[in-house]
Image (cartoon, rainbow, N blue to C red):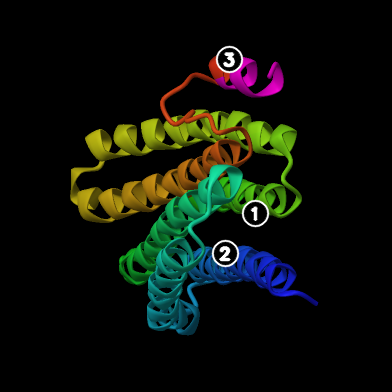
Amino acid sequence: MNTSEHISKQYDADLAALRSRVVEMGGVVEEQFRFAVDALSSGRSDLAEQVVANDRRVNEFEVEIDHDCAHLIAKRQPTASDLRMVLGVSKMVTDLERIGDKARKIARLSAAIRSSGVPDARWLEETHRVADLARGLLRDALNAFVRGELDEAIAVIRAAQGIGRLVNAISGELVRQITQNPSQVAVLLDMMAVTKAVDRVADHAANLAEHLIYIIKGTDVRHATLDQIERETLQR
């Protein structure tokens, strides 16, 4: 093997390793979110404590992958699609870390909500259902990244908007309860914070999909409408 061929193969290996680390971090973050929601639904304090303790691992992933991105740019000086991949990965890990933050927030709030008494069963059921949808979007966004599928990325963005509408309905009911039950304001606000945290997980999953579109097409769609995203990505 000549020198240039060796360098090329090592470069490809570096890029593949970077992608693998993102997927690995995504798996940890997804598990954190699942455990946090399960802690809320079941009242298991051990799950909540585990999420809080493991948040450090998520933060370490972010720092390490960002370091790998900077090292790869300095060492390999990637261009075109390879450079977009490195830059996109750096943005993706930020969103993954923020999902981890939301999981930690839900875990911490679950203890306060449970200590106030048995939470509203309907709210718990609806929140868990929306959280499952949000977690599915996170998984779909990561799968789209692995496969490099634009259609799947757009589907994630579209579905995230649907989750937003469900969250608005849940939040509206909580606001109604706050006005009718002033003595329960503290716990209702905690419940509202959990609902919003679940919504933000869906938003961050959509951000992952937007970063993937940038990686593949070189188009920044972060502030575009869904119709604009479809035109910019599928017709080019």
Residue occupying the point 43% across, 51% down = 91
Which residue in the structure is indicated by mark 1?
A: 142
| Magenta stretch: helix, strand or loop mostly | helix
Residue occupying the point 24% across, 51% down = 184
Which residue in the structure is indicated by mark 2?
A: 22
Q: Amino acid at mark 1?
A: Leu
Pick the front one: 130 or 149: 149
Which residue in the structure is indicated by mark 3?
A: 227
Mark carried by residue 230: none
Q: Secondary structure at mark 2?
A: helix
State which region is magenta: 229-236
Q: Is residue 152 left or right of residue 60?
A: right
Residue occupying the point 63% across, 39% down = 216
Q: Is residue 51 above or below residue 201?
A: below
Q: Amino acid at mark 3?
A: Asp
* Nearest-to-viewer mark from 1 and 2: 2
**Disc 3: CA contacts within 10 A as few (<14), some (14-19) or many (>=20):** few
Q: Quadrant of the C terminus?
A: top right
Q: Cα distance, mark 3 to mark 2?
A: 28 Å
Q: Amino acid at mark 2?
A: Val
